[in-house]
Structure formats: structure tokens, C-alpha cells
Amino acid sequence: MSGISNIWKHPKTSAAGVLIAVASVAGALSQQGITLGKAGTGSLVTVIAAVATALLGLLAQDPATKNGYPDNGPGAGGSTAKLGAWLLIALLVQMPFVSGCSGATVAQDIVNWAPALQSAVATVDSTAAVLAPADASAFTTATAGFDAASNLLAAQARAYLAHPSAGTLAQMQAQVVAFQQQVNASLLQAARIVNPESQSHALATIQGVAAIVNAMLALVQSVSSKTAVAQMAAACPIKLAAVRTYLDDEAAVKIVAGHYGEGEPLARVQVEQAAAAEMAAGF
């Protein structure tokens, strides 16, 4: 009976606990590939997680009340702050490309990313036609390896799914790092373009590829040992910090949200967490 009494006395706390549990379970199911069916372009699991997180957000923003009026007394702000912290916890338990559960999950997600990556690369391939003639040649040279790199990474992910082993994982680790370095180098090249319109076009198209490749890097990093991550980072002479100013985080958020069928607030947390984890690891 004491449990029921506590629920009655602390309805917001109890509701927050239930919503956190729902979001946590939904996040775990999603990471295991359990969808419970489709919901538009996403899955029912991601919809449930998003709704639970949104409701928790409303609780966090709802001012404390007393006798039907706003409560500005002692402790009122602390209650709202706690709910805000719970909202952050609910967001952090759902990180599809920051906390991969297994090599197979990561490899499948990379395969799932392949169509979006190929589309982004195709956009890069067609960009030279709209650049100033003096810039088109340099841009084409800087991005020439994107097609081969994207195809190879997808092929290696499929190879891991077919024969999961330390060797096939090492191939994915090496290729995602090599591709990320190609993208970073092309961003630096595009940033040197003097013509403002050409530079804007060049950076925008490369940024689309960068968003996906960095997501893939975060996926592979999440299932790699500390030793392997250190080796991967050592193979990255062009660090993420050197190109951060040329990356469009909002574009990345939209790409991630669309891929996972989730809301942009959650995607924004994932993008920021992935970037922080990569930079902390030395990428």
C-alpha cells in the first residue's frame, strides 16, 4: 500500500519514472533491431520512445504548483531541475549510433546507411558542374575517391555480417577511418576556394557525406576496443577539430533524424555526443 500512497503523493515523480522506463526499454529494443512494426518512415519503437521523451519534456517544463497556483516557494525550482535531468537521462539512453550493441548491429546499420551515403556522394559528383570553372577541377580531384570509398565500406559491412570476425571488423575500422580522412581533406580543400558561391556549394555537398561518415565512425568506434580505437585515431592526421568549423551540425541532425525516424531534438543530442566521443578518442 505504501507504493500506491507514494504514487498518489508524488504523481509527477511517478509519471517521470514510468516515462523514463518506457524510453529506456524502447531504446534497448531499437538497438536490438526490434521494431514492433512500421510507423511511417520509422518504427513503432522509435515513435513510443519519442512520445515518452516528449511527455517527459513537458513535465520538465511544467512549473510546480500549489493549490492550483504556481509554486515559487523553496524546493519548487529543484523539482523542475530534477525533471530536466530525468529528461536528459531519457535522451541519453537512446543513442543508436553512439552505443552500438554488437558488431553485427553496427555492420547492419552501416549497410542501412549505404543508400543515403550513395545519394550524398552522387550529389558531390554532380556539384562540379555548378562551380566556377577554375574551382571545378580542384573540387573533382579532392572528392574523386568518394564513390570507391563508400562502396568499399558497405561491402566490408556486408562481409562482416556474413563472416563476423576480428579480421572483418579490422577491415571496417580501417576503411571508415580512411574514408573519414578523405572527407576531412576535401573539406579543407573546399574551404580554400576563393569564389564565395563555389565555396558554399562545395562545402554544402561535402558536409552531407561528412555527416554520414562521422555517424559510421561513431558506430564502429562504439564496438571497438580501446586499443583498436587508439590505433584508428593514430591513423587520422586530419583531426575532427581541424574541420569542425566547416561542418553543418543542423544538416547532420536532419540526416540522422531522417535515417532513424526520430525527432530532431534526439538526433541533435546524438550528433553532439558522437562528435564529443570522437574528439575525446583523438579522431
Image: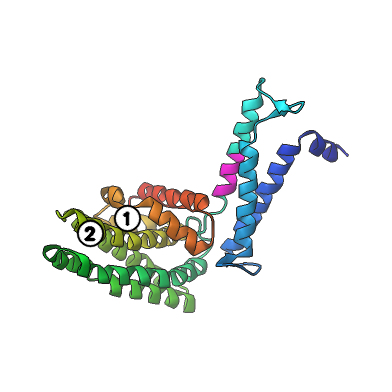
Q: Is residue 243 above or below residue 59?
A: below
Q: Which mark is residue 185?
A: 2
* Residue linked to disc 1: 233
The answer to which of 121 and 231 lies nearer the viewer is 121
Left or right of residue 267, residue 152 in this image: left
The residue that appears at 30% across and 58% down in the rendered structure is 204
Q: CA distance from mark 1 to mark 2?
A: 15 Å
Query: How far from the left and from the top, in percent, is residue 239?
Result: 28, 52
State the image quarter where residue 39 is shown. bottom right
Q: Is residue 94 above or below residue 159?
A: above
The residue that appears at 33% across and 50% down in the rendered structure is 282
Is the C-beta separation of discs 1 and 2 under 8 Å? no
Identify the amino acid type marked 1: Ala
The residue that appears at 66% across and 24% down in the rendered structure is 75
Q: Is residue 218 above or below residue 157?
A: above
The answer to which of 225 and 154 lies nearer the viewer is 154
Residue 267 in sight from this viewpoint: yes
Residue at disc 1, secondary structure:
helix
| First in residue order: circle 1 vs circle 2 | 2
Query: How far from the left and from the top, in percent, is residue 160?
Result: 45, 74
Farthest residue, direction right: 1
Farthest residue, direction left: 134
Farthest residue, direction top: 74
Left or right of residue 72, residue 189 in this image: left
Read off the magenta span: 85-92
Identify the amino acid type marked 2: Ala
Query: How far from the left and from the top, in percent, is residue 273?
Result: 45, 49
State the image quarter where residue 3 is shown. top right
Is residue 172 highlighted in magenta? Answer: no
Left or right of residue 82, residue 125 in this image: left
Residue at disc 2, secondary structure:
helix
